[in-house]
Image: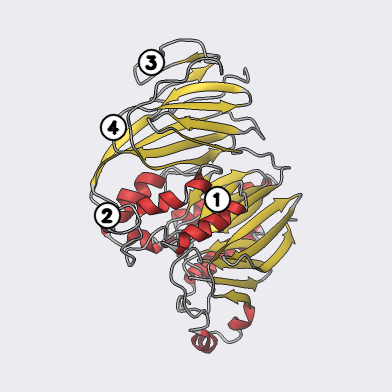
Amino acid sequence: MNRRAFLRLSASAAVLSTGLIGCGKNGPAGGISPSDSDPLPDPVDATVTKGPWLTILAPGTVRLRFETLEDVPVPVVVHTDGFRADLVTESTTATVTWAWGWAQAPTIEDLPGAYTVHDVIIEGIAPGATLEWEIRTTTPVSGSAHPNPLPSHSVTLAWVADTMYPTSETVAELATAMVPDLVLHGGDMQYQSNPADTWNSFFGFMQPLMRSAPFHACIGNHEFDAPEEATELYDRLFSGQGDTDARWHAVTYGPVHILMLDSESGDLADVGSEQVAWADAELAAAVSSGLIPIVAFHRPTYSLSKHWRSDTTLRESVHALAIRHGVKLVLCGHVHGYERFVVDGIQYVTDGGGGALTYDLDEKRDEVEAARPGESELRVMAERTYGCTEIVVDEGTVWVTRTNVDGEQTDGFSFRAD
């Protein structure tokens, strides 16, 4: 295939193939692919309310997504590998009833109304290529990323979870300073317990990260603060991540294969569930392909905080998967702080220090010890601070570092993938 025949929208939208560009749902319009000297598409009068952000659907394939108030197609200009393509979004409009925040807050309220989600799916991105994009609205929005590294490339991941205004802004700045290639969010994007904490504010402070790296998110318990929140916000905005349309998905990024699981539905604790069977197959395929497996979900299975679990079914299900497939790193959020347990050589890292109010991480130590003597000795580090976790993968070695908002690197370890 011609290197320039690499871009495509979803099946019902525009298609770029062998230098010809189609437009809209009515079939190809014909025309020559533009060059950098050609004029840019005219901007559209549309207000971007959330995003844009990239998710990786498969190696070399990404989705660029954003939300607007107006139900109009929006031009998107894409550059990669020295080639430019002018595309048009496919859009879906929905009525949203969710509302939160108040007008006097320094954040933007979440208001009910009709909102339009825009998608552009870009395929055939060459390994190692830089993808640049520009949303052609009256106030253009642009960004770039490296969405398809080779397995031999060094990559940096940032893990952030449990983000609450205003500290979440500082944590996002800390994560941005890590210059991550890929951003992982562990769930609980905003909290209804904070009247200034809104979905609009979340997308505002995350924009520097979203414009410089692909962004993938787990679902957390606070995505269910109201019955409509999970469907109208999480599902509407984050459905179709990775390789599934479910609330769990996997993403291959260079040398790693990351499972972003759903710990909130209950089926991750059921060893006979669809999600566990899917995770089992995903991990087996990843390991057989020489990729480093990482498992991530919201609610941790090890903690000495108030979120310890007397019921060990979720733990047993996840631990069995990890043991069976040689997983050495499990990432979680939910606990507002940082804890690390080492169990059977598996590093269980919980970092929910993204901004939500912290609490005593030893509150339930005595209860845990009474129920399961010796378990507290499995915890090797705990810190009641805000911060995020950096994961660097290079030549088969994984380095994990926890940095708090004071700039202190307070925990770190490494392991070989083999």
Q: Circle 3 sits in a helix, a strand or a loop, which is it?
A: loop
CA distance for labels 2 and 4: 22 Å
Q: Nearer the viewer, residue 63 or 58?
A: 63
Question: Would you identify the image quadrant in which residue 65 lies?
Answer: top left
Could you tell me the amino acid type at mark 4? Asp
310 lies above or below 227: below
Residue 256, position as x, y percentages in the image: 64, 49
Question: Would you identify the image quadrant in which residue 153 lies?
Answer: top right
Task: State the residue position of label 3.
Answer: 27
Could you tell me the amino acid type at mark 2? Glu
Task: State the residue position of label 2.
Answer: 228
Crowd around label 2: few <14 · some 14–19 · many ≥20 (10 Å): some
Could you tell me the amino acid type at mark 1? Val
Mark 1 vs 2, N-terminal side: 1
* Contact, mark 4 vs mark 3 (Cβ under 8 Å): no
Question: Would you identify the image quadrant in which residue 212 lies?
Answer: top right
Q: Is residue 281 visible?
A: no
* Contact, mark 1 vs mark 4 (Cβ under 8 Å): no
Residue 320, position as x, y percentages in the image: 58, 65
